[in-house]
Amino acid sequence: MKKSILTASLGLLFLGKFAIGQELYIPRDVKEAYENKTRSKTGKPGDNYWQNSATYKINLEVNPPNRSVKASEEITYTNHSPDTLNSLNFKLILNNHKPGVPRLGMVSEDYMTSGIHIDSYSENGNQKEWNSKNDGTNKMIKLDTPLKPGESIDLSINWHFDISKQSGREGAILENTFYLAYFYPRVAVYDDYMGWDTMTFFGMQEFYNDFNDYEISVNVPEDFIVWATGDLQNPEEVLQKKYAKKLEKSMTSDKVIRIATPEDLKKKEITKDGNNSWKWKASNITDVAIAISNEYNWDAASVVVDSTTNRRVSVQASYDNVSEDFKEMVDYGQHALNWFSFNYPGIPYPYSKSTLVRGHGDMEYPMMVNDNSHEDPDMARFVAEHEIAHTYFPFYMGTNETRFGFMDEGWATTLEHLIGIEDLGKEKAVESFKNFRVRRWIGDNNMEQDVPIITPSNILSGPVYRNNSYGKAALGYLALKDLLGGEVFKKALQGYMERWNGKHPIPWDFFYSINDISGENLNWFWDSWYFSPNYIDFKIEDVNQQNNSVEVSITNVGGMPAPFDVKLTYTDGSTKRVHQKSTIWENAENKTSIKIATEKEVKAVAMEGGIWMDATPDNNTWEK
């Protein structure tokens, strides 16, 4: 009787686990989105999908080496949601520099500033009080008149702030060289599953923004050059004729043109006399960033990113003369934009320009990259490629980096490896990926490392945040590519991107889109890779050779359905390698056996995972 009860219990446990594997965990707020039909389990936007948007007209006054910036903006914010908004939440990211605000780590005195100071604020022309004293990185402002569905509100804000001495994602790079990012008060995202994004910026997790239209005017002294997100609207008004022509020529040139050299900078004849107002425009984009300098070289060229239209994209670099790697940066940028456009993800680079600035952040922005200098040219190219890859994730796709870092960094890491195979050859690329993205995770048995990837990024920090967002997530995406094959993988990825370009996808939109487009129910795969506390750890239990085959019994100790090769070594010294996709674990629970046809006598067997490194490799071999 006890045996029958035990058998029944085990059967229910197995069926329960199987059922869970076939239906993904869906949090309550996402369930509501399905009920409201803003999203669907096909992975497509629902019939009632919506998102809000705004137009920003920003005016900046910058006078290096003075680090104080004065600014104003006019915002028209439109409520496309079905909800009446009684308040607006503003993001004030630069307040992360203020003393007393919460941060995830220590900072130096040079990082500290007094944050953003709002000098005036008005709604539809009516002045309102805004006390900046206790502001953090969020500020909820109650509206005088609630904003009904379909209505817009005009906002006017004047503010000032000091650029931090310490340069990271933004700040003063040199005495007269500044990188401005997150510098403007913006209306936070109000979305269909979470409502207002009120997440505090602690200094590590990144960003979540609506798709907006921007017009920017940057007023700087004579001799200062400005680079920014968007298209320069008035090159002939701010540049001397010679340099305006160089810039224009670079837009159709495959060859790098040195627009401003150290000799040009010494002559101080690059810009028009007196103060100049550099005007930029960008549409349907999630953010803007700006670089300003009178001591940086300026290179430019272009590259074709769409063979059907022969559309060209400008690639520019801004850097100090001692950064030798940046003298090749336009070449690196051309290569990256071309490769990503024609290979993976195989979607033409969606913007008109990409500018790579020598800074300190190793950080991406729409049409802009803020990168360190590296002595190793392979590392310099690697970092540039990773940041340019972010063009697609999160900017083209509008993902929430703060909550789902693996939808952002995981994909950039995946693309970085795929282009790395082109750059370095497969063997070196695999070794580089293992060392840089995998080893620190798989070699660390701390329980934090087993936290599922789906865990919201905003509640993670340190190594577990980095590993979940970067290496672990990328290993899952690359295992998916191995499982589906390159052709189906690309079709499914592009289909997902087509559905959600310019919108705000969440993980379930991705998972269900891939299922739908590939025609495969991959919930077992998603559950094991992204929703479960798994890691990669296989063990060869036994090897038996009979007649014309050898059977290898394997246990999946860690639970991750990673692909691997079985390598047979024969007594005559020859070898045979058989690849096993993740599908071997679909219905196998945690044990499986592989039967390989062979007429030779087997001397040894080894499991080799390549980038899918094993936590305990010592039990991945067998010898007769």
Image (spheres, rainbow, N blue to C red):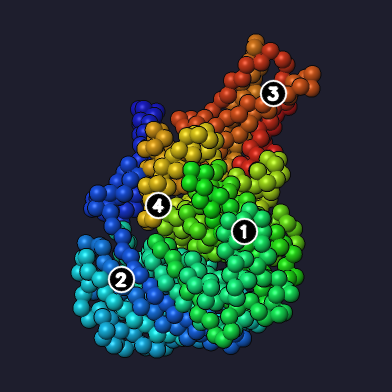
**What's the residue at 66%, 79% (across, down)?**
269
Residue closer to the observer: 141 or 16: 141
Q: Residue furthest right?
A: 572
Mark 1 or mark 2, which is nearer to you?
1
Mark 3 or mark 2, which is nearer to you?
2
Q: Gap between marks 3 and 2, in whole Å? A: 63 Å
Q: Which residue is mark 1?
A: 301
Mark 4 or mark 3, which is nearer to you?
4
Q: Secondary structure at mark 3?
A: strand
Whether residue 614 is situated above or below residue 107 in the rendered picture = above
Q: Which mark is residue 501?
A: 4
Residue 280 lies, in percent from the top left, at: 47, 71
Asked if the residues shown at circle 3 and circle 1 are in contact, with their CB atoms under 8 angstroms apart, the answer is no
Of mark 1 and mark 2, the one earlier in the sequence is 2
Of mark 4 and mark 3, the one earlier in the sequence is 4
Of mark 4 and mark 2, the one earlier in the sequence is 2
Whether residue 411 is situated above or below residue 547 in the rendered picture = below
Q: Which residue is mark 3?
A: 576
Q: Secondary structure at mark 2?
A: strand
Of mark 3 and mark 1, the one earlier in the sequence is 1
Query: How packed is label 4: few (under 14 Cα within 10 Å), some, or many (20 or more)?
Result: some
Residue closer to the observer: 211 or 106: 211
**What's the residue at 68%, 40% (across, down)?**
426
Q: Which mark is residue 48?
A: none
Disc 4 marks a residue whose amino acid type is Asn
Q: Residue furthest top?
A: 547
Residue 314 lies, in percent from the top left, at: 56, 59
Residue 95 located left or right of residue 54:
right
- Give the quarter of the figure containing the C terminus: top right
Q: Which residue is mark 2?
A: 77
Disc 3 marks a residue whose amino acid type is Lys
Q: Quadrant of residue 89?
A: bottom left
